[in-house]
Image (tube, grey):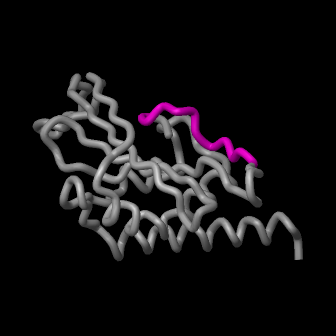
Amino acid sequence: MNMRRVKEDEYVWAKKIAYDFFQENPIIRSAVFGNITLNADGFTHLIAKDLRHKRNQKNQMKRFELLKYLKPVLEGMKYYQEYLERKQAVKVKRNKTIFLEFRVVKYWAFVAVIKDRIRIKVILKKIGDGTIIFWSIVPSWKLRGYKEFRKVVLSNGNLEED
């Protein structure tokens, strides 16, 4: 069997599991914000940074793999570690017409250490007066042993892009 074919099969399988996770958990109850909506925007953001920039498959698979920690982090954490608020052009649909309108967009990030080895960042987003949605999950680093760590760079610190 071709190695490329095996990796492609793993990717398709991981993407399906992530898609199923979103279908089975349309709402997660957060200790801080109440109901967090998991929708197509968050799922699409795991695959691509924006409409023109798709993430590489390794990056996507890592994010899909970390989704299993999303529920425990949001349900268990009582405080967020990062906050960003900015005016941003957002697509708005009125009378069957789509156009850009500036709205206040808020981002919150929860940083958690899972199993004393994996540090992740869960990012939530709210546009205007809308509902709070899951936006992204980002791995930061993994420990191999005491005082040893290797950095996994899949984020750049920008809550909007991560």
In the rendered image, residue 64, in percent from the top left (x then y), is placed at: 55, 62
Where residue 36 sits, quadrant-wise, is bottom left
Q: In this view, does 21 lie above or below 97?
A: below
Q: Is residue 61 visible?
A: no
Q: Toward the viewer: 105 or 142? A: 142
Q: Is residue 5 left or right of residue 88?
A: right
Q: In this view, does 79 lie above or below 37?
A: above
In the rendered image, residue 93, in percent from the top left (x then y), is placed at: 19, 38
Q: Is-magenta flag for residue 25?
A: no
Q: In this view, does 146 lie to the left or right of 74?
A: right
The segment highlighted magenta reads 150-160
Q: Is residue 156 left or right of residue 125?
A: right
**Residue, x 82% and y 64% (percent of image)?**
4
In the rendered image, residue 83, in percent from the top left (x then y), is placed at: 33, 35
Q: Which residue lies furthest to the front in this view?
A: 146
In the rendered image, residue 56, in percent from the top left (x then y), is placed at: 66, 47
**Residue, x 39% and y 52% (percent of image)?**
42
Q: Can residue 26 be seen in this view?
A: yes
Q: How many marks?
A: 0
**Residue, x 48% and y 35% (percent of image)?**
161
Where residue 128 sits, quadrant-wise, is top left
Q: Is residue 33 left or right of residue 147?
A: left
**Residue, x 77% and y 51% (percent of image)?**
148
**Prevailing secondary structure of the magenta residues:** loop
Classify the position of the N terminus by image quarter: bottom right
Q: In this view, does 84 lie above or below 8?
A: above
Q: Toward the viewer: 31 or 84? A: 31
